[in-house]
């Protein structure tokens, strides 16, 4: 989860860098429009982080990955972190299922 948080923070810095780079070299209107587009993707990945923190790791991970696509190669940090969080959640779910299954099968009939 920490890697995903770091990746989303890096993507936010990328949004700011995109704005300043485009504003310096191109038109201000184009810079603002593209920055708003990039900010929408960043907001999607931030929403994914919030959902992962709230316990919906699979949905949150998918949203974080989708939001980080625009920022490749910088977005790979968030993608790997989200994928790792999703995998750890699946492992915890499987352990919980195994524990519940063993307690129900061990009980006397």
Image (cartoon, helix red, strand yellow):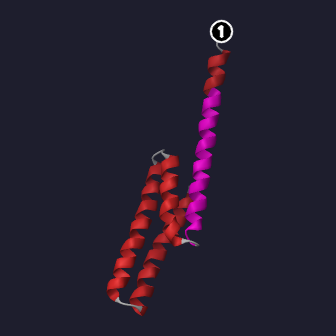
> Is disc 1 placed on a helix, strand or loop?
loop
Q: Which residue is at a point 54% across and 66% down the rendered structure image?
A: 7
Q: Is residue 44 visible?
A: yes
Q: Which residue is at a point 52% across and 71% down the rendered structure image?
A: 71
Q: Is residue 92 left or right of residue 43?
A: right
**Residue 45: % across, % down:** 46, 61
Examine the rendered structure and indicate whether residue 78 appears above or below residue 73.
above
Examine the rendered structure and indicate whether residue 108 appears above or below residue 4.
above
**Residue 40: % across, % down:** 39, 67
- Determine the main secondary structure of the stretch shown in magenta: helix
For disc 1, the marked residue is 108
Question: Is 98 contained in the magenta span?
Answer: yes
Q: Which residue is at a point 46% across and 55% down the rendered structure image?
A: 48
Quadrant of the drawing holding the C terminus: top right
Q: Is residue 101 left or right of residue 65?
A: right
**Residue 26: % across, % down:** 40, 91
Q: Which residue is at a point 49% across and 60% down the rendered structure image?
A: 66
Examine the rendered structure and indicate whether residue 92 appears above or below residue 1.
above
Q: Is residue 3 visible?
A: no
Part of the protein shown in magenta: 74-99
Q: Is residue 38 left or right of residue 65?
A: left
Q: Quadrant of residue 6?
A: bottom right
Question: Is 80 contained in the magenta span?
Answer: yes
Mark 1: few, some, or many residues within 10 Å (few <14, many ≥20)? few
Quadrant of the drawing holding the N terminus: bottom right
**Residue 55: % across, % down:** 48, 44
In front of the other: 67 or 97: 67
């Amino acid at each position: 989860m920490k890697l995903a948080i770091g990746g989303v923070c890096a993507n936010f810095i990328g949004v700011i860098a995109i704005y300043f780079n485009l504003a310096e070299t191109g038109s201000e209107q184009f810079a603002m429009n593209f920055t708003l587009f990039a900010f929408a993707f960043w907001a999607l990945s931030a929403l994914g982080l919030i959902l992962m923190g709230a316990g919906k790791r699979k949905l949150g991970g998918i949203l974080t990955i989708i939001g980080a696509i625009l920022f490749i190669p910088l977005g790979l940090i968030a993608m790997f972190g989200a994928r790792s969080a999703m995998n750890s959640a699946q492992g915890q779910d499987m352990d919980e299922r195994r524990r519940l299954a063993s307690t129900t099968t061990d009980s006397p009939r």
